[in-house]
Image (cartoon, helix red, strand yellow):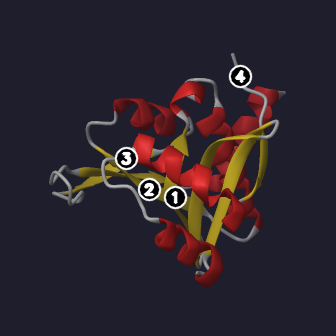
Amino acid sequence: MKAEVTIVPMTPRHLERVLEIEKASFSSPWSKRIFYQELAGNPYATYVVAMAGEELVGYAGIWLVLDEAHVTNIAVSPQWRRRGVARQLLDHLLRVAYSQGARGATLEVRKSNAVARNLYASLGFAAVGVRKEYYTDNKEDAVIMWLRDLSAYFERKEQADG
């Protein structure tokens, strides 16, 4: 069942809940300081949150550099996973990036995270390489994935939504 969420810009008032989700989702979570620096001091960054009514249930971020979007984070509260929230967050950020001139998008994902890799593949991302021992907590490899053509992504999406 697809969750009904509203995607809004992340602000500092969201950070406490974002950090709860971050800690529940990642073995090497970002700190409040890192998120705050992204929001306040990174002109290339866009971060959003998914709201189910008054409850913050997920968040995601990208950097837009020249014509490339780089997905930096995406996480959903454990109770809200497998309900389409991550897909909605990522789709929203890809639209933002495309509207600002991005032609493609990239990300890194843990090799062991098959659920996330499958989500990204379903959106058109393809595995193109590996960053050996990318994750510092356990030296796990990262799979580099690319969605090379955002315009084709949106054409496919329009046809599917019909």
Mark 2–mark 1 contact, CB under 8 Å? yes
Q: Which residue is mark 4?
A: 2
Spatial CA span between label 2 and label 3: 16 Å
Mark sitting earlier along the chain (3/1) = 3
Q: Residue at x 74, y 28 (%)?
A: 160
Mark 1–mark 4 contact, CB under 8 Å? no
Label 2 sits on a secondary structure element that is strand
Spatial CA span between label 3 and label 4: 24 Å
> Which is in the foreground here, disc 2 or disc 4?
4
Foreground of the two, 36 or 48: 36
Mark sitting earlier along the chain (3/4) = 4
Q: Which residue is mark 2?
A: 107
Label 3 sits on a secondary structure element that is loop
Q: In this view of the protein, can residue 151 be seen by the observer?
A: no
Give the left or right position of residue 35, taking residue 87 as reference: left
Q: Quadrant of residue 58?
A: top right
**Image quarter hosting the C terminus:** top right
Spatial CA span between label 2 and label 1: 5 Å
Give the left or right position of residue 118, taking residue 66 as reference: left
Q: Which residue is mark 3?
A: 26
Q: Residue at x 42, y 47 (%)?
A: 23
Residue type at mark 2 is Leu
Residue 39 horizontal/vertical position (percent): 63, 73
Residue 21 position (above or below residue 108)? above
Residue 157 horizontal/vertical position (percent): 72, 37
Residue type at mark 1 is Val
Label 1 sits on a secondary structure element that is strand
Label 4 sits on a secondary structure element that is loop
Mark sitting earlier along the chain (2/4) = 4
